Image (cartoon, helix red, strand yellow):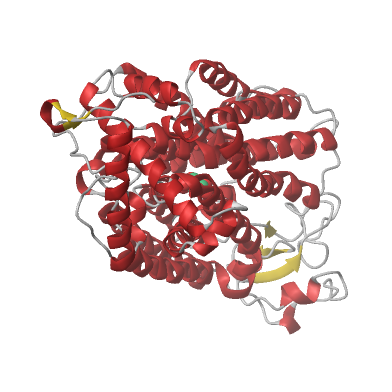
Amino acid sequence: MVAIAAFSSSGQEKPAHNPKLGLFVYILASAAVIGGFLFGYDTSVVSAAMLYMPDAPGLKPMDTVWQEVLVSISPGMAAVGSLMSGTSSDYIGRRKVILGASAIFTIGALVCAASVNKIMLLVGRVLLGIAIGFASMIVPVYLGETAPTHVRGMLVSAFALMISFGQVVANVTGGAFSYIDPYNVGWRLMFAFAAVPSAFQFVCFIFLPETPRWLYENGFEEETREVLEKVYNGDKEWVEYEMAEIIAFNEDQQKENEKMHASGPVIWRILKTPHVLKACFIGSMLQAFQQLAGINTILYYTADIIRSSGISNNHTTIWISVALSVCNFIGPFIPMSLIERVGRRIIFLFSCGLVVLSLIFIGVAFLLVNHDSAATFPGNQYGTNFNSSYPDAKGCMAYTNCDFCVTTDACGFCHDANTKQGYCLPASSDNPEDYSSTGSCTSVNGSIPNNFQWEKYYCDTKFTILPIIACGVYLLTFSSGFTSLPWVLNSEFYPMWARSTCVSISTTSNWVFNLIIALTYLSLTQVIGKYGAFWLYAGLTIIAFVFILFLVPETKGYSIEEVEMLFMNKKQRREAETRRRETVTEVRSRLNSTVSFGGQLQVHKY
Ligand SMILES: O[C@H]1[C@H](O)[C@@H](O)[C@H](O)[C@@H](O)[C@H]1O
């Protein structure tokens, strides 16, 4: 970990008091974090909608490939959206990208809600994905560039809190709308609901300003000052200080560009600037580690985990999901309230350590379920009504217990209602939830003969409820730091010229790893078991802990212009400080400024 003495780019003393914030900052931040809400809502609501869409008129038949495409297309497009939004936010500004995102969110929600066939639904999900990608990249940048230093971490944490809130609300609306003719109307209402906050955000951002940093960088000096006046609630000392920081930093960057003969794409410059490259690598790894800790397997597969504890009613499943997502929502209040007092690193390390423990706990819970689940009969006892030439029959028969059996999509467990032991049989292709395709649980005139019982998802064990409890604990620990810190740190790590590109790279890393984990989870559980999958995530999170411990600097208290220095080595830092000092002198003389009241730099317009 590196630590540097506090200094400022402008060489000017920071005002000793914290600025008193006015309503404006809170309105601005509240409007911006709606982007987090929409991110959380639109990634989650599809799980509840998916319980009904496959049987909805107009969308039938919807096979599993269609279902998987409709679910994963949005995270996939989010990766594309976040990559695209970096460059565009440099050209057109941060505010316009937020406006674009909220417009696309609104259109996407309405297209999904009005879908008359699968293609239209797919188009709607693509639009939502692009908007999610835009929002996930731009909102932290917008807040990072606009928020006063002493509340910056808190406001970006509020973005993460709103992601979790969006996920809770998606579950609640999913539950509520599932009572209103769910196959015809309910699932449409679930999508349509999100059009309201997105339209509201659009209207707000018609009136809200661009970030002061982007304005100055693009030659709008007067407007920069106006925005700072509003953000700092007219506190002259702070406005002048921030203005001087922005000017000096900007000048310093220009000098540096000239020295490096910097031209061409920003990405090229990032590759040639070691400390920025290092920051971008660390930022992207933090986002990757967040996903490698398995958060979205728990969130996306909540319904499966609940079902595997024997709950088969859709409504009950949705309401238990609500309870779990509330655990995910409580945690982010911790970083939000403590981040400016105890700093980023402690919260991050604390949460990361607890996540390792809870992942181990989930693994243990699944292992206990596995060991306590009934054994299967040996292959030679499968009886004469079993035909091993049926598709998947041999594969299912190879499983040694109920848990391994029901974890595989193609198989189910068939047992005598009075004894625990049973057969692992291939599920019927027409009616997988009720019958096997061959063997003792085949349908005979619409029922299963001889007191046999068919379980597609569930094994009766002493520990069946334990994974649900373990998931609740995991969500609490994850959301008390891991949810927020990658977003907060990425909004702070980079200098202005590289910020949007680096944030867009790190956000894309988040989405790409999100997809990798989501798409590999089921196969992973089949190869190493559910417990193996969670222990693997625990192992990766231990690596994350060490990574944070040694490579992530504390950014609390530094202005956004100062943070990049934390990634420099001593020599680079000394050079940068000297250069900045020279710049300050130049800026001062050019601005014809003098140190006036209270040692404060007066900046005149030029
Ligand atoms: O920070 C968020 C949050 O933790 C969400 O719950 C999760 O779905 C996202 O993937 C993650 O980036």
In the rendering, at what x and y percent does residue 283 appear?
Answer: 45, 56
Q: In this view, does 560 lie to the left or right of 397?
A: left
Location of the N terminus by quadrant is bottom left
In the rendering, at what x and y percent does residue 142 appear?
Answer: 46, 34
Residue 525's place in the image compared with 256, above or below, is: below
Residue 473 appears in view: yes
Most foreground residue, 508 or 415: 508
Residue 178 appears in view: no
> What residue is shown at x 73% (from left), y 52% (from top)?
433
> What residue is shown at x 63% (from left), y 56% (from top)?
515
In the rendering, at what x and y percent does residue 546 appear?
Answer: 35, 69
Residue 391's place in the image compared with 151, above or below, is: below
**Direction left: furthest residue:** 598
Badge count: 0
Q: Quadrant of residue 355?
A: bottom left
Most foreground residue, 173 or 44: 44
Q: In this view, does 233 lie to the left or right of 474?
A: left
